[in-house]
Structure formats: structure tokens, C-alpha cells
Amino acid sequence: MSLPTVAIIGRVNVGKSALFNRLVGGSRAIVDGTPGVTRDRNLGIGNWSGHDFHVVDTGGLVPGSEDPVQTSIERQVGLALEEADAVILVVDILDGLHPFDQVAADLVRRSGVPAFIAANKADNISRDPAAAEFFSLGLGFPYPVSALHGTGTGELLDALVSVLPSAEHSDEEAVSLAVVGRPNVGKSSLVNRICGFERSIVDSVPGTTRDSTDTMVTWQEHRFRLVDTAGLRRRSRRMDDLEYYSTLRSWRSVDRADVVLVLMDGSEPPSQQDIRIAGRAWELGKGLIIGANKVDLGFDRKVWLDLLLESFHPAKWIQVLFLSALQGNGVGRILPIVWQTAESRSADLPTSEINDRLQKAVQDVQPPSPGGKPLKFFYATQTGMRPPRLLIFANRPEEIPDNYRKYLENSMRELLGLKGVPISISFRRREH
């Protein structure tokens, strides 16, 4: 990563995610009164006094727990510490010193990473003296803070940025890839396979990933930000608050992505929810790739693809990858195709090429003549990108039938080689 990294760790329900949200300037992590809501790491970018840095939120530590998810959380915390340039240990000033705080402090001490104690929930100045007992953790001065209200965080951040290394600037921005789909189709397994080691907790229980997590990877000097999202269930009245906010954040992850990989379970026909997710990403103007996971189960690829094309017509313009997140089949093709798709989505198309393609499309299928007067198309130009937007001048744009508009859209996408990318075409009147 080009920016220094700060990890936030601590036991359950001390306010780590609230502090994370405070540092990155928004509600990126799920905040809830239920202990253990954050299971995976969550990544955001913070800024203080001109210093940019990555902030990593981690799951709450419950040492000695027999819950297998807790074992996974401890591995995630270990990964965060390995990558961190500094760490914030969050403790609860209301509860006072807890044995789990000492365990967390020992983890930090063994990592050798510069550490800062945030004594959270100091919502008024009368509670500040209570922070003194956390000196016994051996990590220096405990900063009384209120993650909820922001008090005290300035002093903590002043100290934090003073130990961070300078950011290494990169001329190339990372391509953001959101991996989305229904629960338990293998999203976390796929992200872990792409990364080469475990980054997200993988479990056979649907809904293990509750929040969206970001990971930076590199392929042939191209940088990618991988976003593994919570499973997108169909909205229902019985959806609880936690599930609702997980779903909301998944869609926000899609909204900020350049390319979306919709992962489906290839061992069963594409569901209505699969198609709804893909359609929504396409409508949002994202580059789109469809992955059919679990080829190791031996399903018929042609039959599955035919079913997809029947229910989702834009699939004819989209790369469909047959994958096995478990065994790695087809995974090596993902990042090259993501890069190609992102390039198409941000293409700056030469005006001469656009007009050559427009003329070819019009010659291949002659325009209709509403009211006996032929439609004429004079000129086209690109007006935007991500996704590409074209403006075509015509003599009577208001009379162009919908089917011919759709024909031009599909033809221009094909002739311009825009695979996996929606294209927006608008028309404007011109008499000559």
C-alpha cells in the first residue's frame, strides 16, 4: 500500500468500530451494541493534519473463547498487526481495566509496532482521571477519548501521525473491485484465493461476512482494491437492523467500485436475486463480470450459461468466468479481466472512431422513417466516461423508436469493443 497503516484492536464492544468511523469520517464499519458485530477487518482512509493513512478495524477479542469464529478473528488481528505501522488499543473507561485488555496489550507488545491507548467512552471531563489505571498495560499514556462525540481524539491523532512513515505516492490509482452476491456463494473464499492467503473469515454458515472488507493486491504493477461484501439477501420485512445495515453497506461498496464481480453458485440455476444484483450493478454504470463458482462440482457450463442469457440479456456483453474458489480454477483470469474492464469503462474514445462506428451501424441496419420521413444521424461525440457516454446528433431525435435506440447502443458497444461495460447514449436535434 502507498499509505501507512493504523490498526485498531481491542476486546469486544469497547467502541473500536465507532472510533474507526470517527477516524475515516463516516459510517464505514457497522456499529451496534451487540458484542462481536465486526468479525472481519475493515479498511478506510483517515486524514489528520495533512497526513493520509489507512485505518484497519478488527473484530473484538475474546481470549479463551471456544467459538471457532473467535479463532478466525484472532488470526485477522494478527494479520492487521503484521501490516500496521502503528496500532490503537481501545479500552473502555467505564468498565475499567479488564483481563482481556492485558491480553490485547501483550499481542501489541510482541508485534513491536508503535502503540497508543484510546480510553474510550470518556464522554465528559470528569471521567478523564479514570484513564490513569491503563498505564499498567505498559503502552504509554492512555488518551481519554469519546469516539461517539469526538472529544479527545485530536490529541490521540497528533501523537499517532508523529510516528507514521511518509506516504509513498503512486501516480496510478487502484482499481476498485467489489465482489458481491448472495450469502454463501463463496465470496470470501474467492477473495482469499485471489490474495493468496486468508484475509476474510470463511465459514460454511451463511452470512459469516457481515461487513465489507477491503484488501489491496497487485498484478503486473497494477493495483487493485478488493472489497469482499456481506451476502445480499432479498429485502424482507423480517430483516433485522444489523442485516439491513450490512446490506446497505454492501450496496455502498458497489456504488464506489469501478468493477463489480457478481459471484453466483454454478451448481444451481441463476436465481432472481442473482439477476437482481447483476442488473442493479449494470444500472449503476459499473464494469461487470459474472463468476459461476463451484465448477469442482461438475455442473454443465453450457446449460448454466444458456439459463443466464435467458434471464439476464446484458450477459451477452459481459465476461462470464467459470471458477472454483475452493480449488483455484479460473481465478488467475480475474484480475486481468478486471483491468481490461476498468480500462474500457474509463476509455477516452477518439471522435473519428466513434463516428466511423456510428456510420457502420447505420449502414448495417437502415434507420426507420417515421411518418415517411427518414431519420438521419449526423455526428457523435463522447461526453463522459465511467461508463462511456455518447451524444449523437440526429434530425428528429424524439421520433427514434426504442428498438432502434437499443440497436445503436448494442452496436456501438460491440463496434467500440466495450466488453462488460454499459454505455449511455443520448440524442440531440440537429437539422443539417
Image (tube, rainbow, N blue to C red):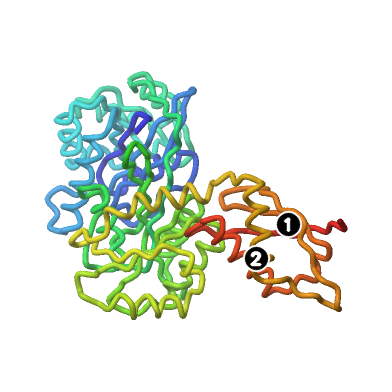
User: Residue 239, percent across and down?
Assistant: 43, 71
Q: CA distance from mark 2 to mark 1?
A: 10 Å
Q: Disc 2 designates what residue?
A: 408
Which label belongs to residue 89?
none
Q: Tell me if residue 341 can be seen.
A: yes
Q: Give the left or right position of residue 84, taking residue 382 as reference.
A: left
Instruction: Name the residue: 44% across, 34% down.
Output: 172
Instruction: Name the residue: 40% across, 33% down.
Output: 145
Which corner quadrant holds the C terminus? bottom right
| The quarter of the displayed image where residue 19 is located | top left
User: Residue 340, percent across and down?
Assistant: 43, 50
Observer-nearest of 294 and 343: 343
Q: Give the left or right position of residue 239, taking residue 65 as reference.
A: right
User: Is 14 situated above or below 111?
Assistant: below
Instruction: Name the residue: 43% across, 74% down.
Output: 273
Q: Tell me if residue 123 can be seen.
A: no
The amino acid beneath tag 1 is Ile
Q: Report crowding for label 2: few under 14, some 14 to 19, many 20 or more residues within 10 A (C-alpha).
A: some
Q: Disc 1 designates what residue?
A: 392
Which corner quadrant holds the N terminus? top left
Q: Residue furthest top?
A: 162
Q: Report crowding for label 1: few under 14, some 14 to 19, many 20 or more residues within 10 A (C-alpha).
A: many
The amino acid beneath tag 2 is Leu
Element assignment for label 2: helix
User: Residue 91, percent across and down?
Assistant: 29, 38
Q: Are dots 2 and 1 in contact, CB under 8 Å?
A: yes
Observer-nearest of 149 and 377: 377
Element assignment for label 1: strand
